[in-house]
Amino acid sequence: MCGIVGAVAQRNVVPILLEGLRRLEYRGYDSAGLVTINGGLNRVRSVGRVASLANHAAQQKVHGHLGIAHTRWATHGAPTEHNAHPHVSAGLAVVHNGIIENHEQLREKLKGLGYRFESETDTEVIAHLIHLYYQQDKDLLSATRKAVKELQGAYAIGVVHEEAPHRLVCARKGSPLLIGLGIEENFIASDASALLPVTQRMVFL
């Protein structure tokens, strides 16, 4: 199973994301990645252990008050950096657990609209689909709602956009996801254990 962690706070969320991923390592994975929003979208991905991702993040001095992170167990596409999450469409990023059964049909639709794909994953379809709807009204929640109506299968997703630096959107169907409630900060995760260092107040979606 893959693992999701996300955070929006008034402090640097990178340590929260990385510790959350470490606590999800038991689920099994072959690659990991994270995105922060800090004057733009910053993405770091790595094949292998979370420790490798942490080293890359430190080298690139990645930080921000909003971010999402992911450990991936390869289903669509090999365990490579370009298949690792988060997946990006312009200034929008998505992490995803689950299987999108109609991803091939959606991929062809999006290619016809001019979207270019950099991975073999079903998740990149979600990123481009949300971006498509975001272009219509510039509302990340509305765009996510419209996009998930087209998804067939199971999903838990976290979504951020560089144009909404204080907003973390999530949705689930079939795959586990919960919200952690803090003081002036909130979190998402696949498992409560990922958030225990920052909160014990949780809402199971």
Image (cartoon, helix red, strand yellow):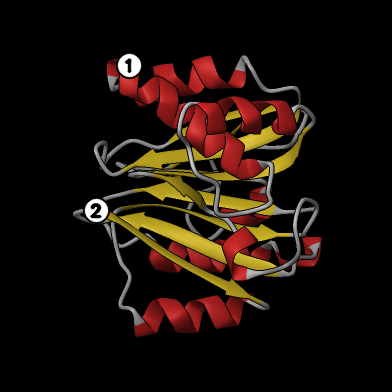
Quadrant for residue 167, please give it: top left
Question: In the drawing, does residue 19 fall left or right of residue 156?
Answer: left
Q: Is residue 145 left or right of residue 37?
A: right
Residue 103: x %, y % from top left: 71, 32
Work out whether 52 lies above or below 77. below
At label 2, which amino acid type do we have?
A: Gly
**Closer to the camera in the image, 67 or 140:** 140
In percent of width and height, residue 189 lies at: 59, 46
Comparing 13 with 111, the one in front is: 111
Q: Which residue is mark 2?
A: 40
Residue 145 location (% of width, % of height):
51, 17
Q: Quadrant of residue 41?
A: bottom left
Classed neighbour count for the residue bearing mark 1: other residues with Cα under 10 Å, few (<14), some (14–19), many (≥20): few
- Judged from this view, the residue extending furthest toward the left is 39
In the rendered image, is residue 82 in sight? yes
Q: Which residue bears the numbered disc 1?
A: 136
| Label 2 to label 1: alpha-carbon separation | 21 Å
Say whether disc 2 or disc 1 marks the residue closer to the N-terminus. 2
Residue plotted at (77% across, 59% down): 74
- The quadrant of the rendering that contains the C terminus is top right
Residue drawn at the location 66% of the way across and 78% of the way down:
49
